[in-house]
Amino acid sequence: MCRTEPDPRELQGRRIGALDYGDARIGFAVCDPLHITCNPRGVFLNVAGVFAEIRAAAAREELAALVVGRPFSSDGRTAPIEERIEEFVKHLREELPIPVIIFDESFSTRRAFDAMRAGGARRKKLRQKGRKDEVAAAVILRDFIEEVLRN
């Protein structure tokens, strides 16, 4: 399977997906081919069979690449969640025929929560399981597009 990161020019005009990894749920989002909108697409339960579900979703959405958010510690130490994400990405790269790109997601869940509040989401919606995970994936994807593809 794919082991190298693509040249950003290869992703122009192609759909890209993003995952916000969590021990219980993994948020999923997809952008349009022009990279104008990043839409939440739900969550995957982080249980046996999740890699097959992600592979099927990537094929269904016709993704050219998948971005996985990973928080990078400012002090240089590796947190346990970072190690689990690295292992998750390793398996994804073995399972998927498209590039899997690690991208700094620091504070994406917090920004997703803030964006949902700013958009007028009610408390019930904010507490809905999985909603902030899929919105966090959309935030990761938007940040990736802005920092990598538009620079």
Image (spheres, grey):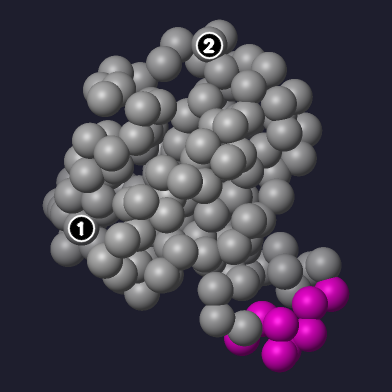
Say if the magenta span includes residue 124.
yes
- Tell me residue 25's x, y (percent): 42, 70
Residue identifier under label 1: 84
Q: Is residue 144 visible?
A: no
Magenta-colored stretch includes residue 117:
no
Q: Main secondary structure of the magenta part?
A: helix
Please determine whether, in this image, residue 61 is positioned above or below residue 77: above
Whether residue 107 is situated above or below residue 131 in the rendered picture: above
Q: Please name the residue that numbered disc 2 is placed on.
A: 10
Residue drawn at x 50%, y 40% is 58
* Residue found at the very far right of the displayed protein: 120
Span colored in magenta: 120-127
Q: What amino acid type is highlighted by mark number 1?
A: Arg
Mark with earlier residue (1, 2): 2
Whole-number angstrom distance, CA of label 1 to CA of label 2: 29 Å
Direction from residue 90 to residue 65 in the image, left or right: right
Residue neighbourhood size for the residue with mark 1, other residues' Cα within 10 Å, grouped as few (<14), some (14–19), many (≥20):
some
Q: Quadrant of the N terminus?
A: top left
Quarter assignment of residue 36: top right
Q: Residues within 10 Å of mark 2 (few under 14, many from 20)?
A: few
The amino acid at mark 2 is: Glu
Looking at the rendering, in which quadrant would you find the C terminus?
top right
Q: Would you identify the image quadrant in which residue 124 lies?
A: bottom right
Viewer-proximal residue, 19 or 103? 19
Are circles 1 and 2 on residues that touch, CB within 8 Å?
A: no
Q: Position of residue 95 (x, y in %)?
A: 28, 39
Q: Is residue 70 left or right of residue 127?
A: left
Dot 1 falls on a residue whose secondary structure is helix
Helix, strand or loop under label 2: helix
Residue 126 has which mark?
none
